[in-house]
Image (spheres, rainbow, N blue to C red):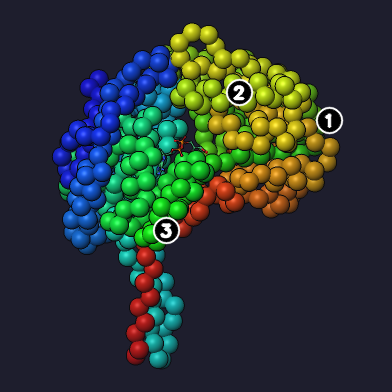
Amino acid sequence: MNIQNSLLIDGAQVIGTGASFSVINPATEETLCLCNMASSDQLDQAVAAARRAFPAWSQTPDAERSRFMHQIADRIEANAEELATIIVKEQGKPMALAQLEVGAAAGWTRYNADLEIPEQVFEDSDNRYVKEHRKPLGVVASITPWNWPLMIAIWHIMPALRTGNTVICKPSGMTPLNTLRLVEIMNEVLPKGVVNSVMGEAEIGNAISGHTGINKVIFTGSTPTGQRIMVNASNTLKRLTLELGGNDAAIVLPGSDVDAIAEGIFNTAFINMGQTCAALKRLYVHESQYEEMCKKLADIAAQQVVDDGLKPETTFGPVQNANQYRLVSELVEDACKNGGRIICGGKALEGLGYFYPPTIVADVLNGIRLVDEEQFGPVLPVIPYTDVDQAVQMANDSKFGLGGSVWGADLELADRVAQQLECGSVWINNHAEVLPHIPFGGSKMSGVGVEFGIAGLLEYTQLQVINTQK
Ligand code: NAD
């Protein structure tokens, strides 16, 4: 496979002139590719190209923009195998999950292509006609993390394009290669300058969020980086959508059918090796079913094949990077020092690669790091409770508010509990399900704004009111 490492600015491939860095395969610790960050001059060139492309793109008729986007989806599907292989090599997830990511990228593209931009009439009376007009913002910068790199790039780029904006993408330096290839594929279809890519970390990120030529930043990543972007963006009052960290709680109601729900709980906690913003990250189980649930989860963990995601039998890949791998070990050790009991896993695998098996830690409570912090890795703390009010209070005892879930057969009770949870999405008998037509976003320190559906689309527009006196 010819892995490309160049930026794409104004329709042309260019090598970054900033510092070089290595992209590492987390399954082997080998260098996959040597890349160069963009210099600040190259960022300026990308912004200038996007600004030049904006007038024509924003005035392109809706139906034509939609056609371009369907052509992009066709190109993603035609290059699906290559994109999925790049994702496995740089991100680590098993091939089936990478294929799902590429499929979702194409699906999300088509969904956005077919979305209508709604415009309301506020008043149509004898005196006046007042309507809403939705205008594109200008240049949108997308900054993405390393966990679902291709899908999240699509989540950012597609509503921006649909509403007539032009785009600068900055992927994570841990997993830039799939996004660089995606932008290259898009440029086979789009007019030059409509979508551009740059590479780099905090330095280029700061330059983006403070740039006077960029009108909006859509950011998915950690809460501290989101806070930094908000500060930097204040000089230009940039529009922001911030999808940040989470520490989602799940409450299993007393009397639940543990056999029926354990698989769903395991899958939504350990999806992508736990490296998913809205994964289930803290599990609260009534004391009457506590041991049964821990055992069932351990049985499912024992069935996982932990190995390189390129091997067909692998169901569980490595942690994406060395820092996250160390953090997971550190949180598990700290939990054990604070009375935690390892039900399964609990120790990194020996040898090359950042492999950490699915780990369940019991007998922990709020107040220890593994429960209070976002672990973002393959370890799930299971916390006992005695009554549902106490479980709700412990679930809400967090600075984060991304998602949450309630599990049980009594759907009315589950709904009452759901309404008490302080988070942007609550799933009942499920978790972490995101869909292109359902708004998704965080409360508290988990974010500002929403993505997906009409509500998400409108975040890429400026509301203008046109008030006509009759
Ligand atoms: P991160 O914040 O370290 O990095 C995210 C991106 O920000 C990267 O592209 C990075 O290069 C860039 N960046 C770094 N410093 C910057 C700066 N000063 N200004 C602008 N950009 C900068 O996050 P990560 O480790 O890549 O991702 C993991 C985090 O992302 C977790 O907290 C996870 O919960 C969160 N996340 C949230 C969602 C969501 O939808 N809420 C989805 C996925 C991941």
Q: Which residue is mark 2?
A: 330
- Give the amino acid at mark 2: Glu
Horizontal relation, residue 173 to residue 434: left or right: left
Q: Who comes first in sequence, dot 2 or dot 1?
A: 1
| Residue at 49% from the left image edge and 8% from the top image edge | 351
Disc 1 secondary structure class? helix
Question: Which quadrant is home to the C terminus?
Answer: bottom left
Q: Nearer the viewer, mark 2 or mark 1?
A: 2
Q: Are marks 2 and 1 in contact (CB under 8 Å)?
A: no
Q: Residue 441 appears at what percent x and percent y?
A: 52, 50
| Residue at 76% from the left image edge and 23% from the top image edge | 339
| Residue at 37% from the left image edge and 82% from the top image edge | 467
Q: Who comes first in sequence, dot 2 or dot 3?
A: 3
| Residue at 46% from the left image edge and 25% from the top image edge | 320
Quadrant of the rendered structure where residue 125 is?
bottom left
Q: Badge 1, how many Cα within 10 Å: few under 14, some, many 20+?
A: few
Q: Residue 295 appears at what percent x and percent y?
A: 73, 20
Quadrant of the rendered structure where residue 29 is?
top left
* Above or below: residue 78 compared with residue 457: above
Q: Badge 2, how many Cα within 10 Å: few under 14, some, many 20+?
A: some
